[in-house]
Amino acid sequence: MEGIHSRSDWFEVWFDSHHYHQLYGHRSNAEAKAFMEALHARLGWDRLSLLDLACGMGRHARAAAELGHEVVGLDLSRNSVEAARRLHENVPGLSFEIGDMRDFTLNSTFDGVLNLFTSFGYFNKRQDHMAVLNGIHSHLKPDGFLILDFLETGFARERLNPSEMVVRNGVEYHMERHMESPEHEAWETFVKRIEHRSEEGHLVSHEERVAALEHGHLESMLHEAGFKIREEFGHYDLSPWVEGQTPRLIIHATKS
């Protein structure tokens, strides 16, 4: 991992910060459980081997394991993985690894790979996005599948909140959002700037950047990586995706 990708990448620093976990720690385990149960029922899953890629602290991985699946969670953030191991140590069939989604290597293949809650699109170059998809493809069994849960770009763009402030455990997090149009890419980028005071009182800034990938961009990259799209959902209850109208673009694709 070290030496291949720069430590200046925003996600390597921010995702390993305790402020990241504090800001987003309210995310619902119940929501993750309901999503996994919906996928399990809709797609007829039965004791699968699953990889939760960019698993964070493992809420989706745990929900899948509790349904009887063997699950490996992989994440770049050492702090997230260590927390996941502590939180879920008594859950059978669940383990966690540290790794970069662009160049991970595991000594096994899986029935399915999950990439959830907009854990894709973090990179500046198309080749990095393709590296993720190619790595997923190589870790799938011949008839394996991918669940790619991405934001619905049109929906998100139209509802972009330019500024807000939230308080978590007494810390004020000031957030500003805007769109950028990088010259070297065919898509815009969602940019969120986050500022807060450190424990010593210094102003600290972080930035989140997600490529504003449209359906066509994702479809093209998935096809290039050797996937065929089977279904598309627009909500975590797996109701249909409608371009620009639903909050999520959840793609069910299979290895071809």
Image (spheres, helix red, strand yellow):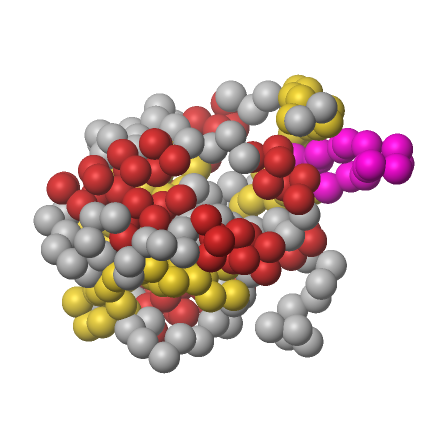
User: In the current view of this chain or complex, which residue is farthest to the front?
Assistant: 90
User: In the current view of this chain or complex, which residue is farthest to the bottom?
Assistant: 107
Q: Is residue 198 left or right of residue 241?
A: right
> Which percent across, then down, holds residue 193?
71, 35
> Which percent across, then down, holds residue 9?
68, 57
Which span of residues is magenta-colored? 191-206
Given residues 231 and 35, the one toward you in this image is 35
> Which percent across, then down, holds residue 170?
71, 24
Is residue 115 visible in the rendered structure shown here?
A: no
Above or below, 19 relative to 217? above
| Picture residue at 56% right of the left edge, 44% below the top | 210
Given residues 126 and 34, the one toward you in this image is 34
Q: State the quadrant of the C terminus.
A: bottom left
| Picture residue at 43% right of the left edge, 62% below the top | 96
Q: Is residue 225 left or right of residue 78?
A: left
Q: Magenta includes 203?
A: yes
